Image: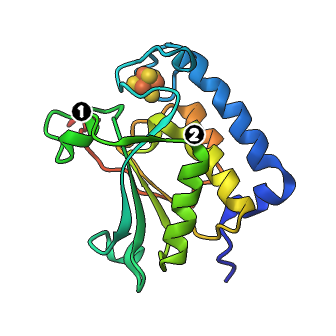
Amino acid sequence: MNLTPSYMKLSDTGELQSRAERMARMLKKCALCPRACAVDRTSGELGECKAGAGIMVSNAFLHFGEEPPLVGMGGSGTIFLTHCNLRCVFCQNFHISHIGHGEEVGADELARMTLQLQAMGAQNINFVTPTHYAPQIVEAVAIAAERGLQLPIVWNCGGYESLPVIRALEGIVDIYMPDKKFFDNDS
Ligand code: SF4
């Protein structure tokens, strides 16, 4: 069985870097999620999620409490992103998603974090609440792939992405793990 993460092939052809550049343009009239705020995050405007042009990270660590298939022997290399586009009132990570606990890091620093988790034995890179930072994360993965990242990418999200984002992530994300938050009894 070939376990090579799909983004490594895109990195080899240069498509991953091109994808990151194309996705960065999405921040100028943000519609990364169905809220479609249409704000220019690159000029400091903020939408419902309160996320800016940079990436904010609350925490990064080896998580042994994730779903067992993601934990394996070495733990899931979990990176909690700050802010959230879904903003559930019952959020268990309220201080991160609503209040904004975290520090701003650049794509280069985020790439370094993924490589550090890999060196610590992580089985995957598990981005928690990633959707509102999709372009910046792809940029970081492109940098990390060039520096030797070889772990599958987990998209641990609220399931609230726009279709263009899902299409843009094709071949980059290996495992989707959306939480089912709400549903309609009639559908
Ligand atoms: S990601 Fe944030 S700014 Fe962009 S559309 Fe969603 S809530 Fe609005």
Residue at disc 2, CB closer than 8 Å to ligand 1: no
Q: Residues within 10 Å of mark 1 (few under 14, many from 20)?
A: some
- Residue 171 seen by the camera: no
Residue 73, placed above or below residue 148: below
The local secondary structure at tag 2 comes to: helix
Residue at 41%, 28% in the rendered image: 51
Q: Position of residue 95 (x, y in %)?
A: 20, 40
Residue at 55%, 42% in the rendered image: 106
Residue extending furthest toward the left: 90
Query: Which quadrant does the N terminus fall into?
Result: bottom right
- 14 left or right of 164? right
Residue at disc 1, CB closer than 8 Å to ligand 1: no
Q: Residues within 10 Å of mark 2 (few under 14, many from 20)?
A: many
Residue 135, placed above or below residue 25: below
Name the quadrant where ligand 1 sits: top left
The local secondary structure at tag 1 comes to: loop
Q: Position of residue 18 (x, y in %)?
A: 78, 40
Q: Quadrant of residue 78?
A: bottom left
Disc assigned to residue 33: none
Q: Amino acid at mark 1?
A: His
In front of the other: 177 or 65? 65
- 144 left or right of 84? right
Measure the C-alpha gap from mark 2 to mark 1: 20 Å
Residue at 59%, 37% in the rendered image: 135
Q: Position of residue 88 (x, y in %)?
A: 21, 35
Q: Quadrant of residue 118?
A: bottom right
Q: Amino acid at mark 2?
A: Gln
- Circle 2 residue: 136
Dot placed on the residue nearer the N-terminal end, 2 or 1: 1
Disc assigned to residue 98: 1
